[in-house]
Image (cartoon, rainbow, N blue to C red):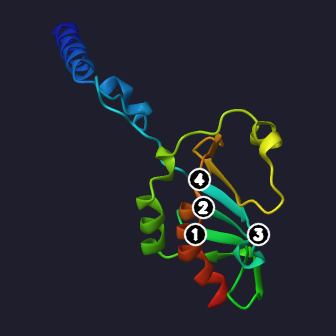
């Protein structure tokens, strides 16, 4: 009688595991990998980014890096100038508010076109000494870095979100 009960439980366990695998529960260990269906696009979200701009007007030079710590909080480091030409710098990291991160996410930096190859090689023939140059690098989970093509207008939007953390400090 005991052997029949063991066999019965084994059959029940096998049936349950088959049912669970039918509904996709076998990939519980990969819960962060989402498989998209046909026509769906899964655009990864940046974990951190760096943006810098050189400009003919020194007041418009800036360099910011936004990073996330192990607790999920975002910080900004870098340098910028105010309208009077005063330079502000922070290497320790200034905490960003959730609303600032939301505003930065609405810029959809992930959807910008990628920069192919080495940007300096592409622009060597067209380089002007007083030209505005914007560089934007996004870092994703796992450390993958992607250089994106950013406009001067986008750079100023990011500047307007982040510079008050330096200037009003």
* Labels 4 and 3: the sequence-earlier one: 3
In three-dimensional space, the C-alpha distance between marks 1 and 3, rounded to whole angstroms, equals 14 Å
Q: Mark 1 or 4 closer to N-term?
A: 4
| Circle 1 Cα neighbour tier, 10 Å, few/some/many (<14 / 14–19 / ≥20) | some
Q: Could you tell whether 68 is left or right of 122 in the image? A: left
Q: What residue would you read off at disc 3?
A: 56
* Picture residue at 74% right of the left edge, 67% below the top: 55
Question: Which quarter of the rendering shows the C terminus?
Answer: bottom right
- Residue bearing the label numbered 2: 152
Left of 23 or right of it: where is 106?
A: right
Mark before the other along the chain sequence, 3 or 2: 3
In this rendering, the answer to whether 16 lies above or below 120 is above
In front of the other: 146 or 5: 146
Q: Nearer the viewer, residue 64 or 46?
A: 64
- Residue 29 sits in quarter: top left
Residue with the mark numbered 4? 150
Image x and y of residue 61, in percent:
74, 71
Q: Are marks 2 and 1 in contact (CB under 8 Å)?
A: yes
Check disc 1 and report the residue beneath it: 156
Q: CA distance from mark 3 to mark 2?
A: 12 Å
Residue 30 position by quadrant: top left
At numbered mark 1, what does the secondary structure look like: helix, strand or loop? helix
Residue at screen point 49% across, 76% down: 97
Q: Is residue 67 above or below residue 146?
A: below
């Amino acid at each position: 009688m005991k052997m029949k009960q063991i066999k019965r439980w084994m059959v029940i366990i096998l049936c349950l595991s088959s049912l669970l695998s039918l509904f996709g529960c076998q990939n519980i260990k990969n819960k962060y990998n989402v498989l998209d269906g046909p026509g769906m696009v899964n655009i990864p979200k940046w974990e951190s980014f760096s943006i810098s701009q050189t400009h003919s007007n020194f007041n418009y030079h800036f360099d910011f890096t936004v990073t996330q710590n192990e607790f999920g909080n975002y910080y900004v480091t870098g340098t910028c100038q105010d309208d009077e030409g005063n330079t502000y710098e922070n290497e320790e990291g200034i905490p960003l508010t959730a609303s600032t991160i939301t505003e930065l996410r609405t810029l959809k930096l992930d959807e910008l076109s990628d920069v192919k190859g080495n940007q300096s090689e592409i622009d060597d023939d067209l380089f002007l000494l007083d030209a505005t140059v914007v560089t934007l690098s996004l870092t994703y989970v796992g450390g993958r870095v992607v250089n994106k093509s950013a406009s001067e207008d986008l750079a100023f939007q990011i500047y307007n979100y982040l510079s008050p953390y330096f200037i009003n400090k």
